[in-house]
Image (cartoon, grey):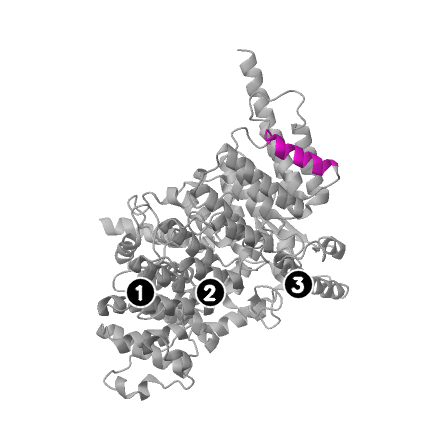
Amino acid sequence: METILKIRNISDITNKLTPHNSDLTKTTREQVTVEKLILKKFEDLHSCLRVNQNLPELFKEQHIKYLKDNLFYLPSSYESLDASQTWLCYWIVHPLSLLGVKLEDSDKSNIAKFLGKIIFRCQSPEGGFGGGPSQIPHLAATYAAVNALIILGTEEAYKIINRQKLYEFLLRVKQPDGKFAMHTGGEIDIRGAYCAISVASLTGIMTKELVDNTAEWIVSCQTYEGGFAGCPGSEAHGGYTFCGLAALVILNKGHLCDNQALLRWLVQKQMKMEGGFQGRANKLVDSCYSFWQAGAFPIIYSLLAKDGHILLDHLFDERALQEYILICCQHPQGGMLDKPSKPRDIYHTCYSISGLSIAQHFLNEKHVLGSYRNELVVTHPLYNIRPDLVAKGLIYFRNFNSGGST
Amino acid sequence: MSDSSSDECDTQHVLFKNRPEWSDVTPLKQDDGDEPVVLIDYTEEFEDCFDYFRAIVQKKEYSDRALQLTKTAASLNPANYTVWQYRREILKSLGKDLHEELDYIGKVILKQTKNYQVWHHRRIIVEWLQDPSKEKYLTEEALAKDPKNYHAWQHRQWAIKTFNLYDEELAYVDQLLKEDVKNNSAWNQRYFVVNNTTGFTEQILNNEIDYTLGKIKLLIENESSWNYLRGLLVHDKKGISHNKKVADFCETLYNEGNRSPFLLAVIVDMCSEQLTYDGGDGDSIYTVMRAKELCNDLATQYDTIRAKYWVHMAETIEKQAKEQDIQDTSSSTK
């Protein structure tokens, strides 16, 4: 079923503005400033709507060009991400795949080769991947590298992963009480658990020993607010909540957390005026949470379905989220931004496009804002990779396992 | 010692390849392959520094000049965890003065407050020294700039919990909430302190409820204070709807005409709690019917962005009520 959604009336937006004089806290002052920027975007769009009924439009060609350009060249402002080079690969190849980019065979092979080369150089002799050539292995860099290779989906890409060494690396950073350090001697938080569980499940190297006590540790990160924190005691946060929930569900332990409290917190993170999500209570909207927060919904639906709750629709406002992404976060020359007034970057491009895909799809239905041309390919909410590519990778490594054991 | 001051006054950066004291080292280029992807257009200074960094790592050189080099590398990219890890190895190997390191990383943190690696480095140095005496002050400096800085709060919690520094923490939280009652990180810290010190005993619970209701009166449209209230009530053995003080507070607000979604949401929970609560009285104002009406009001008027959630809640409550009915009927016929 395909539904084309129409945008909210401007009065539905203006009546949700935070009153200017409601209080004078720093939080409210900053919120009011952002709302003004966003209202301007919505008003501009409404003026254009009179001429073009198909708005808002996803600037597909521009985003594709922006991502492809960045695949080969990044300006020196990306030096701060020199220790995140495998992430740069993932943040580019994933949104391209959601945009349905089918590269020429020759291009594909070239990119695979380039990626293969750079990622091969990032792979450590001791297992796992570092953030760049000759950097020590790191769980987040490993997650990004494995995801990028699975998105490439070629045998050449799969074969780059040294699974035996990867497993040894994962065991090395595993702590006795179930949590994971990001690298040897590195910080410990819930990202580590998700990254380790995600790559282990994708490459078929999951064992009981690897995840002993991990689900229990993750559950201890759920806070009184309902979301998950980076470690026990900290504040509920969108990125960490996604990590906690996705990791639990991959482990088939979703029932261990308080789903009702989690859902209550999650829905509350959608901003009533902006339509996008915030990462924590009383913080500002940010497009990256379009995935981290909205991406948790399909995972929750799977848990509710197990409990016999049959849903007929999203539990967040998928129209308002698409409005925020399409109207407020697109750069006219391609790429996406955190919020109006911020520069574009590939991190926000990846997670805005991922979140847009989440919002557009409910089970097998399509809920697309603007014209049908805005539709993106579906993403797998647990891994944020296209489901067909997840399936292909899983089959490859399963066969590898049975082949290897004989 | 010069180690902590030399770089900061450096106005003219001399490339390592032009420094005589580095002439014995052959720089090691990053191996990007013939046809690289995601190639960053590094500045000359960046490339030069990391070429030498790779070279000393390969040689496993633990020396003063290597320590100095890691400082330049970390200033060019504080997120390079390999640099910090290597720096720690040098510090250990040379037996360096860790108090000096603590001063240095403190300065770096205040320039780079949102970075995992610098805070982690700080934590390791504090662990090595077993001296947490400066951690509260440092995090307060960082929080003065951004009272919601996640890393700063996490570090502060770690120091407090590890070295038992809970004294005065509630006063600090209270100060922050006076400055900004919407600071959710401060509310979270309040929960952390109570949970790890007194726990939520009946008396503490009572005090905390008074405190929170006072803050809600100050500003009703505030998710943080309502979330905290709900967090408190989880510890109330009687449940959410049987705390008379909270129930009266909510009913008064409602009867005064307040329709804050946060208020209505709590009343919905009070109603739905009745479904599972044994020994509820017959004339309770918290009924399934009222819950459904409130969900409908929220969905259509007061919290329309969450309309689908409130419809879902109404259905869930209805379904639970029916299941409860069946249970009650079957148990009464036994």
Label 3 packing within 10 angstroms: few (<14), some (14-19), many (20+): few
Q: Closer to the camera: disc 2 or disc 3?
A: 2
Query: Do callouts 3 and 1 point to residues on the same chain?
Result: yes
Q: Which mark is residue A33?
A: 3
In the image, the segment drawn in magenta is B241-255
Q: Which residue is mark 2?
A: B113
Query: Mark 1 belongs to which amino acid?
Result: Gln
SS under mark 1:
loop
Q: Residue furthest top?
A: B334
Label 1 packing within 10 angstroms: few (<14), some (14-19), many (20+): many
Query: Do callouts 2 and 3 point to residues on the same chain?
Result: no
Q: Closer to the camera: disc 3 or disc 1?
A: 3
SS under mark 3:
helix
Query: Mark 2 belongs to which amino acid?
Result: Thr
- Residue that appears at 33% across and 68% down: B101
Q: Is residue A315 visible?
A: no
Horizontally, residue A112 falls left or right of residue B301, namely: left
Depicted A192 relative to depicted B259: above or below: below
Label 2 to label 3: alpha-carbon separation: 23 Å
Q: Which residue is mark 1?
A: A123
**Residue B178: % across, % down:** 59, 53
Label 1 to label 2: alpha-carbon separation: 30 Å
Q: Is residue A162 visible?
A: yes
**Picture mark count:** 3
Depicted B275 relative to depicted A80: above or below: above
Query: Mark 3 belongs to which amino acid?
Result: Thr
Label 3 to label 1: alpha-carbon separation: 45 Å
**Residue A366: % across, % down:** 60, 51
